[in-house]
Image (cartoon, rainbow, N blue to C red):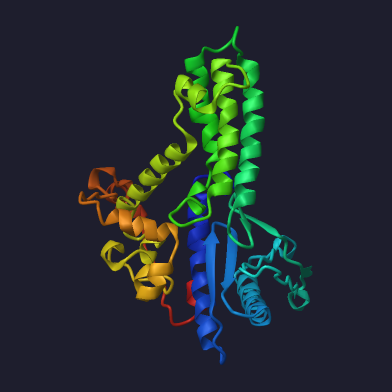
Amino acid sequence: MGQGSALSPILSAIYLAPVIKIFKKRLKTLKENIPTDILSFVDDGLLISQEKSYSLSSSFLLCSYNIMSKILIDAGLVMEHSKTKLFYFTRARHPLNPSIDLSSVGGPVISPKPIWRYLGFYFDRRLNFNYHTHFYAIKYLSTLSAMKMLGNSSRGLLPIQKRLLYRTCILPIALYGFQLWFFKGAPIIKNITELKKMQRRAPLWITGAFRTSPSEGIEAIAGLIPITLHLHKLNGRYHLRYVSISPSHAINSLLDSQHAKNQTSHKTATSKATMKQQANLKSPIKDVNERLNSVRNCFNPLYPPFFPGSQIVDHFSSRISFHSPSSSSDEDLY
């Protein structure tokens, strides 16, 4: 199956699901409790350990990594140690960066880096996402510079066409992943300032105005709303999307019990936090809970006429068979 095929992520999830289940099962059988969580996005796996000391967190990660490596080998898969990365999150002003030796599983010594890239998001150690915003702002400016060859103030595209091109092809690049840092109580002044400087280039190109023109005026003439108001609009739409997500979506386990859609609450869910913790909590999930409390309409994301899975079963029932393996042994899960 090719990597670009639409079935690749589906088959990958089916194949990796029993691997993750075996991993969690083996952690429970150990004499010492290892509180390590695992996340997976297709073939990108993530081991998470939350501890107060670097040594304890590193030892838990190394033990979990060894267990996962052996499970993957038994399943006929290979873990590429050269692509393994290590990253520490901390609020300390002068944090340490201890390495982890993977020689026990045939890997190198991994040294953590100041910036970690995962699924297109750039994480720094203090989670202020300044580097993430700066990276996509630079990418925005390079794309805008390339678009200038399509027209200027005297020839080429019309201003309305430039505005449409900017709104559809350029602006989404700069705002990619803004939900990570744009929420109540977050330190967003530095990120907003950089985005304002970035957007100033667009109305200058659209209208052909002088470089000394005021930003608010040329934005109004070009038909662009201020970047802060645009972020508030997109953030509100982002919150409303949670009303229509599938009941089996993993995000539901992080929401309050009235919005969890009968899912078991995760150990880090807001519903399990104390009153003091909820008062001091600053998170996009908290903003989603507050927004969902004001939503009254109900949406069904799996409306029967739009559910293609049932049609396949109805038309090709003789060709489809289901096998539910027993969870008593690890061999039956492969």
Residue at 20% x, 51% y is 296
Q: Is residue 286 above or below residue 308?
A: below
Instruction: List the single residue furthest toward the bottom.
Output: 31
Residue at 64% x, 82% y is 56
State which quadrant residue 136 falls in: top right
Q: Is residue 5 visible?
A: yes
Query: Looking at the picture, how far across and down is residue 35, in whole percent?
Result: 53, 80
Q: Is residue 6 above or below residue 217?
A: below
User: Which of 121 and 244 lies nearest the eye of the viewer?
Assistant: 121
Left or right of residue 64: residue 111: right
Query: Looking at the picture, how far across and down is residue 306, in whole percent?
Result: 28, 43
Query: Looking at the picture, how far across and down is residue 190, in whole percent?
Result: 58, 47
User: Which of 62 and 123 lies nearest the eye of the viewer?
Assistant: 123
Q: Is residue 273 visible?
A: no
Residue at 54% x, 69% y is 38
State which quadrant residue 111 falls in: bottom right
Left or right of residue 39: residue 149: right
Left or right of residue 77: residue 105: right
Left or right of residue 174: residue 310: left
State which quadrant residue 104 falls in: bottom right
Q: Is residue 124 above or below residue 226?
A: below
User: Which of 160 and 39 lies nearest the eye of the viewer?
Assistant: 160
Q: Is residue 175 above or below residue 289?
A: above
Query: Looking at the picture, how far across and down is residue 310, in whole percent?
Result: 28, 50
Instruction: List the single residue furthest toward the top.
Output: 154
**Tally of marks:** 0
